[in-house]
Amino acid sequence: MTGQVAVVTGGSRGIGRAAAIGAAKLGYKVVVGYASNEAAAREVVSQIEASNGKAIAVKCDVGIEADIVNLFKAADGFGKLGALVNNAGVVDKTTRVDEMSAERLVRMMNINIVGSILCAREAVKRMSTKHGGPGGVIVNLSSVAATLGSPGLYVDYAASKGAIDTFTVGLAREVSDEGIRVNAIRPGLIDTDIHASGGEPGRAQKLAHTIPMKRVGTADEVANAVVWLMSDEASYVTGTIFDVSGGR
């Protein structure tokens, strides 16, 4: 992968951060996309550079199409695109469907679904052999919530991740003969700060007893699966959704 560029959205924290660092170890030059925390993104860049890797940080709110276009233009200036990790996403306060506002739903779907599809659009334009590209790989971040539904918590988030599962399978089949592999990872309860965004910072640890392995996962454990899918070791894997959930 030496010399190829990997774009990682939401790369400043959690799973995205771990995936960015893992991609650099694989030999990718990494574009770390971040929505607001520039300091955290630059820390990821510094860590990659400290290990003799190459990385840049680019501000990108995937809920804004112009930001996505600019993110990939920045990647163009960094080298030939070889991978996209569609990691950026949001959750909201836990609530029932009968209490959800249209504003909440539009924000959720715009960032989690539309943003991911638009990022994939830009990646396909650059990687597809149909467009003169060298091929590449896309890894989408879904969630086990897509299979569980998350009743009483955030059914809208679960639905957005269900859409990512469907999108992964469809896009994989659409571009499989154009040199692009498309897969997804469904993390379970992972020790990241996304739970704080839903108003329950300790949620993962509180539910650890419900997991067959009796513990929560780490961002690195998810990133290991992401990076494997980005590697040539997964050269015959496409249209696949991997659960990284401790059996949940």
Image: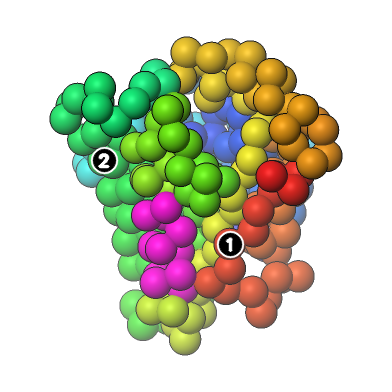
**Residue 146 vs residue 187: left or right?**
left
| Residue at the bottom extreme, as displayed | 177
Q: Give the residue pinned by disc 2.
A: 110
Queried whether the magenta region covers residue 168, the answer comes back as yes
Q: Disc 1 residue type?
A: Ile
Q: Categorize mark 2 by other alpha carbons within 10 Å: few (<14), some (14-19), many (20+).
A: some
- Name the residue located 74 percent from the left edge and 37 percent from the top edge: 211
Element at label 1: strand
Q: Dot 2 lies on which element? A: helix
Quarter the C terminus occupies: top right
Quadrant that contains the N terminus: bottom right
Q: Position of residue 28 (x, y in %)?
A: 64, 53
103 versus 185 height, above or below: above
Choose top left, top right, bottom left or bottom right for residue 213: top right
Find out whether residue 159 is within the magenta segment: no
Q: Is residue 133 left or right of residue 209?
A: left
Query: Which residue is under mark 1?
Result: 241
Q: Give the number of the mark in front: 1 or 2.
A: 1
State the image coordinates of residue 143 (x, y, percent, origin top left): 54, 45
Q: Is residue 204 visible?
A: yes
Q: Residue at x 46, y 43 (%)?
A: 149
The amino acid type, in three-letter code, at marker 2 is Asn
Q: Earlier in the sequence, mark 1 or mark 2?
A: 2
Looking at the image, residue 64 sits to the left or right of residue 209; the answer is left
Question: Which residue is found at the position 30% from the left and 53% from the top?
Answer: 118
Read off the magenta span: 162-172
Q: Residue at x 45, y 64 (%)?
A: 168
Look at the image and name its color scheme. rainbow
Characterize the local packing of mark 1: few (<14), some (14-19) or many (20 or more) Cα atoms within 10 angstroms.
many
Q: CA distance from mark 1 to mark 2?
A: 22 Å
